[in-house]
Every structure is written in structure tokens, then in C-alpha cells.
Image (cartoon, rainbow, N blue to C red):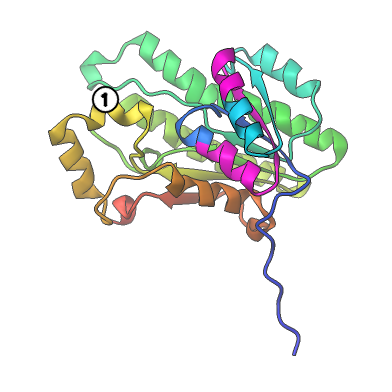
Amino acid sequence: MRFPKTPSFRLDGKRALVTGGTRGIGLGASVALAEAGAHVIVAARTAADVEQVVNAMASSGWSVEGVALDITDFDAVRSFVADSQPFHILVNSAGTARHSDLAGITPADYQAVMQINLGATIFVTQAVVARLREEGLGGSVINVSSQMGHVGGPSRAVYAASKHAVEGLTKALAIELGASDIRVNTVCPTFIETELTARNLSDPDFRSWVLSKIKLGRLGRVEDIMGPIVFLASDAASLITGTALLVDGGWTAE
């Protein structure tokens, strides 16, 4: 009897770019991809943070480089990617959040959130895809979205709007890029214990509300996102594009 062969989750020989790769989910993605065999380029705004993470990862025996890059400087992004070897894997992890009720939303907050969460996702992807197409290569784009790209939440209008937009972008690009064998998907975490969420989760009432919505009864950890990132980057997900992988503990099940 001839059995089907399980596709590999290994990423040997692949080059991966991770934005926001020095902290939180981005750091988890950098480590996970490197552990799976990819050569990882860690990108973040602060050079000292990039150097620290790259040195630590290299000392663990992983193949890694770093670049200090402001991903809201779209010309700088385009120049960096154009001068690099193609990236088979892109993780758009850099993001920000500014929460307030409707009356408190300011143009500055709106622009800051949209420029990073949506604008940078568009233009980093544009640059990476252009290089893949130049070389006739397929690839995997993984946009770190949120459960708030599928539902809403109190005082989260702008953040939720940005992540709903990322979900729409992901589906549109999956349609456009499928013929080039470039897959585009999102990972949608619930509240993960990171620096970004620490202040809000320190409020006992807010933390209690969050836990009441997560059916598995616990907050997310960075480790919970690492497996899904590797999966979507690998051949094990070769027929998956234009979809959202919800890592939300059941939040959106109701």
C-alpha cells in the first residue's frame, strides 16, 4: 500500500523577513521560523533592540540577520527589499494600538494606527512580492491580524477598523497573487501577554472581561502563535490562502 506523505513543516533554505521582530509576537515569529530552519531577517525600528535579538539568536545557533528599519518610511522599505535577496516568507507583525471611545479618537491616533497596521502591511508586502515575482518564486505572506479583525470591542474602534482592513487586504491579495504561487493569510490572536497589552490587562475589571470571553479560560502566550506561524509558512499549508487562522481561545465562536 502506498501511503500519503505528510508535508514538511521545515523551512530549510527559505529566507524570512519579520517586521516588529524584536518583541512580543514578532520575536516569537522570528524564533519559530529560525528553529524551523529558515534564515531570518529581524526588522525593527530601534537598532539596539535589533542587535540584541540578533546576537542572542545567533548564539543559539540559528541563522539570523537584522536591520533597523522604520516600516512607515515606505521608500526606505522599498529600497531595502529591492537590494536584498528575495524573501520566501514575510511576517507582517509590526503593529500598534491606541484605544479610546469614539469621542476621544484623534486624527493623530487614527493616522498612527492606520499607517503601521495597514499602510506598512501594504507597502512591505508590495516590495517583497515584487522581488518574488522578479525571480519567479512563490512565497507565503503572513499578516498578524487580531480577533478584533472579526469582532469589535469597547474603545477599540480604530484598532478594530485597522484589523478588519487587514483581513480584507489579505483576501484581495490572495486572489491577486494566487497565480504567482504566493499565499497570503492572517493569524488572529486573542489577547496575548506582551508589552503591548500589559497596561490594559493590569486593570482587574478589563482582565476579568477578557477572560470571560476566552472559552479556554486563559490569556494567550507568545508561544501559542509560534506554531501557527510556522504552519502557514511551510509546505504543510500549501493549499491555504486568503484565510484567517484564529488563535483566540474560542472568543469568536459565539
On whether residue 207 falls in the magenta region, the answer is no
Identify the residue at the far right of this view. 135
Is 61 in front, or is 95? Answer: 61
**What residue span does the magenta drawing correspond to?**
28-52
**Residue 100 percent across, percent down from the top left:** 25, 20
Vertical relation: 67 (above or below) 184: above
Tell whether 138 sits left or right of 212. right
On whether residue 43 falls in the magenta region, the answer is yes
Task: Say which quadrant the N terminus sits in.
Answer: bottom right
**Residue 75 percent across, percent down from the top left:** 69, 12
Quarter of the view holding residue 152: top left
Q: At numbered mark 1, what does the secondary structure look like: helix, strand or loop?
A: helix
Does residue 46 appear anywhere in the picture? Answer: no
Task: Say which quadrant the C terminus sits in.
Answer: bottom left
- The residue under the point 35% across, 45% down is 220
Residue placed under numbered mark 1 in the picture: 199
**Residue 161 percent across, percent down from the top left:** 39, 30
Identify the residue at the far left of this view. 205
